[in-house]
Image: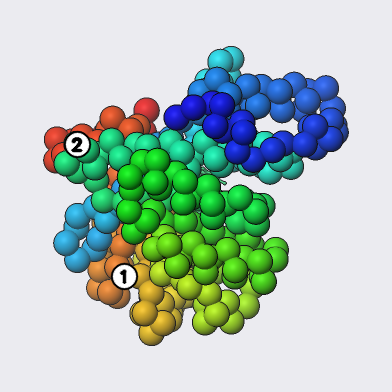
């Protein structure tokens, strides 16, 4: 990974950084520094295949090791990054690091693929497809090992352009996943028009599935809908054995959640891929 490459990738316009309060400006400055000075890191949460109970991949989740405030979750800085345009260098960094870690894991004889979350603006970034091509080549990685997670909101922001970009990525062999499925304001029509490979049932439906018949009904319906469209269905936020068993009974393909594994530091994910890991907590 080179900071120079991240900077030269997607431009941040100064005007976007100049709005707002001194405190905000300060955080914007810190965040820009974070991207340049390698204060960001990725944790990996396994996506577990429910038939084999083996890892089908992992989702890269960004964190910021803030020099003063300690480890910050994405919710504490992604919105600011999106408002200021810093999401561009940040996303470029995430893609670069996730593919570079993926290459290291493959070299260690382990690791299925990696999934990366893309913010709405990044889906519309003109350089996105070219950059993905460049990074896949740089890390000698098969496109099949990369999954892009996008939300319904990201697609609806500019459906025609999202469609073109997702088709281009899919043509390369990159897998397309719809994240937080069921929570956005969107039409189901895009499922028919877009090259979608996977839907992720949002955690809000999975959470109370065992006690709330309406949530259970929604989850089962999404599983059936996904399967009827030939998609892989992933359930997120699986926090206990009861939820896991229901999902297996209903034929859900993949699950993710604290009950299966928290997000792991790169080293923990590597050890888990090699079969060395017992129990790891998110550091
Ligand atoms: P997401 O893509 O839906 O990611 C799943 C979130 O749920 C992660 O939170 C994960 O730690 C959490 N989670 C996993 N299993 C469980 C569980 O069993 N119970 C509960 N309560 N939570 C669980 P995290 O890491 O804080 O990420 C939050 C969101 O931030 C992500 O939601 C994603 O939308 C965004 N995000 C994360 N990394 C990136 C990134 O690199 N780029 C962009 N643009 N967004 C990111
Ligand atoms: Mg996600
Ligand atoms: Mg999600
Ligand atoms: Mg979610």
Q: Residue at x 50, y 33 (%)?
A: 63
Q: Residue at x 49, y 62 (%)?
A: 169
Note whether 259 is above or below 166 in the view shown.
above
Note whether 4 is above or below 60 in the view shown.
above
| Residue 91 visible, this angle | yes
Rendered location of residue 80, percent (x, y):
69, 37
Few, some or many residues within 10 Å of mark 1 (<14, 14–19, 20+): many
Name the foreground residue: 154 vs 8. Answer: 8
Q: Residue at x 44, y 44 (%)?
A: 135
Ligand 1 under 8 Å from disc 1 Cβ: no
Looking at the image, residue 88 sits to the left or right of residue 264; the answer is right
Toward the bottom, the furthest residue is 228
Rendered location of residue 178, percent (x, y):
50, 64
Helix, strand, or loop for circle 1? loop
Q: How many marks?
A: 2
Res 109 → quadrant: top left
Q: How is the image coloured?
A: rainbow
According to the picture, the residue beneath numbered tag 2 turns out to be: 108
| Residue 179 visible, this angle | no
Rendered location of residue 6, percent (x, y):
56, 33
According to the picture, the residue beneath numbered tag 1 turns out to be: 252
Res 78 → quadrant: top right
Helix, strand, or loop for circle 2? loop
Q: Residue at x 49, y 27 (%)?
A: 2
């Amino acid at each position: 990974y080179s900071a120079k490459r991240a900077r030269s990738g997607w431009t941040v316009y100064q005007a976007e950084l100049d709005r707002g309060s001194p405190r905000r400006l300060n955080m914007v400055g810190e965040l820009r520094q974070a991207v340049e000075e390698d204060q960001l890191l990725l944790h990996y949460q396994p996506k577990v295949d429910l038939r084999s109970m083996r890892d089908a991949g992992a989702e890269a989740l960004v964190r910021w090791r803030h020099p003063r405030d300690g480890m910050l979750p994405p919710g504490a800085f992604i919105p600011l990054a999106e408002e200021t345009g810093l999401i561009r260098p940040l996303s470029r960094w995430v893609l670069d690091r996730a593919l570079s870690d993926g290459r290291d894991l493959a070299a260690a004889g382990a690791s299925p693929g990696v999934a990366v979350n893309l913010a709405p603006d990044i889906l519309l970034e003109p350089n996105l497809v070219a950059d993905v091509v460049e990074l896949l080549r740089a890390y000698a990685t098969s496109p099949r090992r990369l999954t892009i997670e996008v939300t319904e909101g990201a697609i609806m922001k500019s459906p025609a352009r999202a469609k073109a970009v997702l088709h281009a990525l899919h043509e390369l062999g990159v897998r397309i996943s719809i994240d937080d499925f069921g929570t956005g304001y969107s039409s189901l029509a895009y499922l028919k028009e877009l090259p979608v490979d996977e839907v992720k049932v949002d955690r809000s439906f999975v959470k109370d599935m065992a006690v709330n018949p309406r949530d259970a009904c929604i989850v089962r319906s999404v599983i059936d809908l996904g399967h009827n469209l030939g998609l892989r269905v992933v359930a997120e936020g699986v926090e206990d054995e009861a939820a896991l068993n229901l999902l297996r009974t209903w034929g859900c393909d993949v699950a993710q959640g604290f009950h299966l594994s928290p997000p792991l530091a790169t080293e923990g994910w590597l050890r888990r891929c090699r079969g060395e890991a017992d129990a790891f907590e998110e550091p």
